[in-house]
Amino acid sequence: MDEFEKHMTEAEKQILRLDVLRKKKETESKVSAEKAYFPGKTRAERMTEKLMAMRNQAEQPVGIVAGPKVEGKYKSVKLTFLQIRALEQLLSKDPRLKRSQLVRIALNRLLGIENSIEENELEAVIREVLKQFDKHS
């Protein structure tokens, strides 16, 4: 190596020194830029990320494809004035009735689905109330 350096001219030695300095400057600026734009995370942030990853992993069982999630709640159902009026009259006649139960019973009837025991009892109450409406009309 010493022979190689002896045969190099001063200009070539200067070029090598500048190249080493340039590479050193690049790495220093890269490190400082990463620190400025991607600051180190605090212990709390690292723990939060770890816990979120664990929760997400626990929610998604391996091998099961996630399908549409049904929560059983339809809060933005649009009803006509006549439907709202009928619901309000039904609800005012019997305190045991609730909007959700009425909708479930009506959908079961429309779709031909069997009612539960409680829903059968409420459907009987609804029929009685509707008969009273027919007599008054």
Image (cartoon, rainbow, N blue to C red):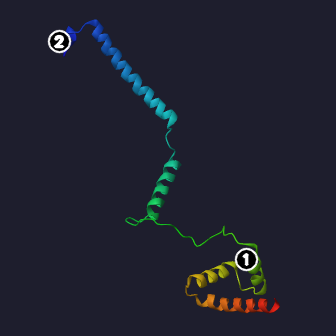
Question: Where residue 22 sits in the image (x, y, percent)?
Answer: 38, 20
Question: Where residue 15 sits in the image (x, y, percent)?
Answer: 32, 13
Asked if 71 appears above or below 50 in the picture, the reply is below
Asked if 97 appears above or below 21 in the picture, the reply is below
Query: Dot 2: what SS?
Result: helix
Query: Dot 1: what SS?
Result: helix
Residue sticking out furthest to the top: 10
Using the image, tell me which numbered label, if any, was put on residue 83.
1
Residue, x 54% and y 70% (percent of image)? 70
- Amino acid at the residue labelled 2: Glu
**Would you identify the image quadrant in which residue 96 lies?**
bottom right
Which numbered disc flags the more N-terminal residue, 1 or 2? Answer: 2
- Amino acid at the residue labelled 1: Gln
Q: Badges 1 and 2: C-beta atoms under 8 Å apart?
A: no
Residue sticking out furthest to the left: 3
Residue, x 32% and y 10% (percent of image)? 14
Residue, x 43% and y 29% (percent of image)? 30
Asked if 47 appears above or below 36 in the picture, the reply is below
The quadrant of the image that shows the C terminus is bottom right
Q: Nearer the viewer, mark 1 or mark 2?
A: 1
Question: Where residue 61 sits in the image (x, y, percent)?
Answer: 41, 66
Residue, x 65% and y 92% (percent of image)? 121
The quadrant of the image that shows the N terminus is top left
Front-most of residues 99 and 55: 99
Q: CA distance from mark 1 to mark 2?
A: 100 Å
Name the residue carrying label 2.
Answer: 3
